[in-house]
Amino acid sequence: MRNIRGRGARPASVDDRTGHRIVPETQRRPESRYGNRPTMKDVAARAGVGLKTVSRVVNGEPGVTPETERRVQEAIDALGFRRNDSARVLRKGRTASIGLVLEDLADPFYGPLSRAVEEVARAHGALLINGSSAEDPDREQELALALCARRVDGLVVIPAGDDHRYLEPEIKAGVATVFVDRPAGHIDADCVLSDNFGGAHEGVSHLVAHGHRRIGFIGDMPRIHTAAERLRGYRTAMEDAGIAVEDAWMSLGATDPLRVRRAAEEMLSGPTPVTAIFSGNNRVTVTVIRVLAERTRRVALVAFDDLELADLLQPGVTVIAQDAALLGRTAAERLFGQLDGTLITPERIELPTRLVRRGSGELPPAD
């Protein structure tokens, strides 16, 4: 049977080398406009008005009749037009955005802190952009400078490193900067902290008041400000109680479960094991709880940082609670105070912690 083609139709040819069918240019589909956003010109053309009229409607300016505004808005909705703020940024010198550099996005402590910063930013009409340093000073610097390169108006930084002179040019250029949870290193800048020393001192003193003399401390990396201050609080509380601290009762390092488990098991072993543990943060506490659950002898526990479901365990976990949301809110308010020009002199703000008694910190020594 013969192939019948319509009159005037141009047959498709086949490339002898590849075997691929070659489609004539006239038969190819037009290029997709994927990624081409509608512009004010598109809106003006659809609505049958001038560019200035569209600009007035988009920016909420007066001088447009209700009927014309309706037509422009219908064109905006039909085309899916969104205002490009780049030109407004150039006019105002502000991007209406701030950056937040966190230590670890997976850490539940930073959830309410980040949310509080975002709420303050939203109240000021600003967008929050955040990222995690993963406790790496180089990554912190890379992330902070990348946010500055995108012209954020300000930075809230939970520092991983201890030298922040790399931010001096950005601060001098007008980038408002506040450090939270830990202070900046080698620069004078606003910082909002919890009373880590006072909280740890209170928690250890609480264990001493319930009869404990052999109290272990398991904390984070000693170079981290919060870990160092909590260790100082532990040592001072023990000294105030007239208790000589043994080296075997203290362990600082990475918070990974294997390291913490090993430290806890060593403290709980031997002829004179500790009768209580003060854990330095929520990640340490989770592993310590697992180790204690495997033992028959009851060991008292006070933890720095509250954690989810701590009140449902048996016994409930006694904690030194920080107000993470208040930390974030205070830091963000300081930031916008700098941007508004009402706060000029850098300050160090320490927020109080709170002892929450739930049972584990009130257990008496087992021997």
Image: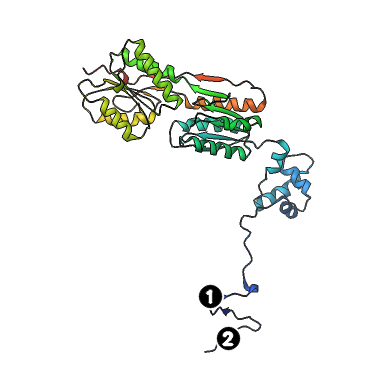
Left or right, 12 with reference to 229: right
Up the image or down, 242 lies above or below 249; here it is above
Q: Residue at x 48, y 31 (%)?
A: 112
Q: Which residue is mark 2?
A: 4
In the picture, residue 223 is in which quadrant? top left
Label 1, secondary structure: give it: loop
> Which image quarter holds the C terminus?
top left
Q: Circles 1 and 2: CB distance less than 8 Å?
A: no
Give the class, few, some or many, for how many residues have Cα within 10 Å of label 2's Cα (few <14, many ≥20). few
Residue 37 in percent (x, y) is at 65, 52
Up the image or down, 351 lies above or below 44; here it is above
Residue 315 in percent (x, y) is at 29, 24
Q: Residue at x 39, y 21 (%)?
A: 231
Which of the pair 333/316 is nearer the observer? 333
Q: Residue at x 32, y 33 (%)?
A: 259
Real-space Cα distance between discs 1 and 2?
22 Å
Residue 346 in percent (x, y) is at 60, 21
Residue closest to the far bottom: 1
Which of the pair 18/298 is nearer the observer? 18
The amino acid beneath tag 2 is: Ile
Which of the pair 74/281 is nearer the observer? 281
The amino acid beneath tag 1 is: His
Q: Which mark is residue 20?
A: 1
Up the image or down, 364 lies above or below 69; here it is above
Q: Look at the image and tell me whether residue 222 can be seen.
A: yes
Label 2, secondary structure: give it: loop
Left or right, 48 with reference to 327: right
Residue 102 in percent (x, y) is at 50, 34
